[in-house]
Image (cartoon, rainbow, N blue to C red):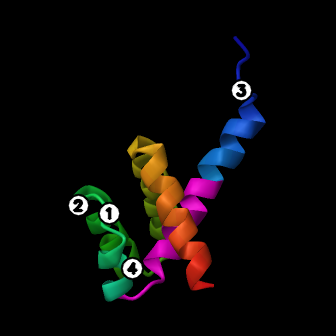
Amino acid sequence: MVEESRSAMKREVEALQDLAVAISKLSDRDVSRLNLPEKLSQAILDYRKMKTNGARRRQAQYLGRLMREADPEEVARWSSQMQQRK
């Protein structure tokens, strides 16, 4: 069994954080269309309200953690929907 390197895990976590932050920049209507879990949806709303960089950074880390807990197939679907919007 091959273990994933620490750097690879960090890249994966950062990618999930980036996706969550990108989702937070969508309109409320677009976010609701993604059918996010309630906890993640609420955390994104909280992220939008934050103004200080430190708070936003910590919230982005929390968003990344919630994204890791989500179903990988759902995360892939959200990612593809984000790519279609670009």
Most frequent secondary structure within the magenta stretch: helix
Q: Which residue is mark 2?
A: 38
Judging from the image, what secondary structure is the residue with disc 1 in? Answer: loop
Question: Which badge, 1 or 3, comes first in the chain's sequence?
Answer: 3
Span highlighted in magenta in the image: 15-27
Q: Residue at x 55, y 59 (%)?
A: 17
**Distance from the alpha carbon under mark 4 to that under mark 2:** 16 Å
- Picture coordinates of residue 83, whole percent (x, y): 61, 74
Nearest-to-viewer mark from 4 and 2: 2
| Quarter occupied by residue 30 | bottom left
Mark number displayed over residue 4: 3
Q: Is residue 74 shown to the viewer in this render? A: yes
- Residue type marked 3: Glu
Query: In the image, what residue occupies the spot 59% across and 64% down?
Result: 18
Closest to the camera, between mark 1 and mark 3, is: 1
**Does the segment drawn in magenta span residue 83?**
no
Q: Earlier in the sequence, mark 2 or mark 3?
A: 3
Task: Assign a secondary structure to mark 4.
Answer: helix
Dot 2 falls on a residue whose secondary structure is helix
- The residue labelled by disc 4 is 48
Above or below, comparing residue 16 to residue 27 in the picture: above
Label 4 vs 2, first from the N-terminus:
2
Residue 16 forms part of the magenta stretch: yes
Point out residue 47 in the picture as x, y percentages from the top left corner.
Answer: 39, 72
Q: Residues within 10 Å of mark 1 (few under 14, many from 20)?
A: some
Is residue 6 rendered to the left or right of residue 84?
Answer: right
Disc 4 packing (10 Å; few <14; some 14–19; many ≥20): some
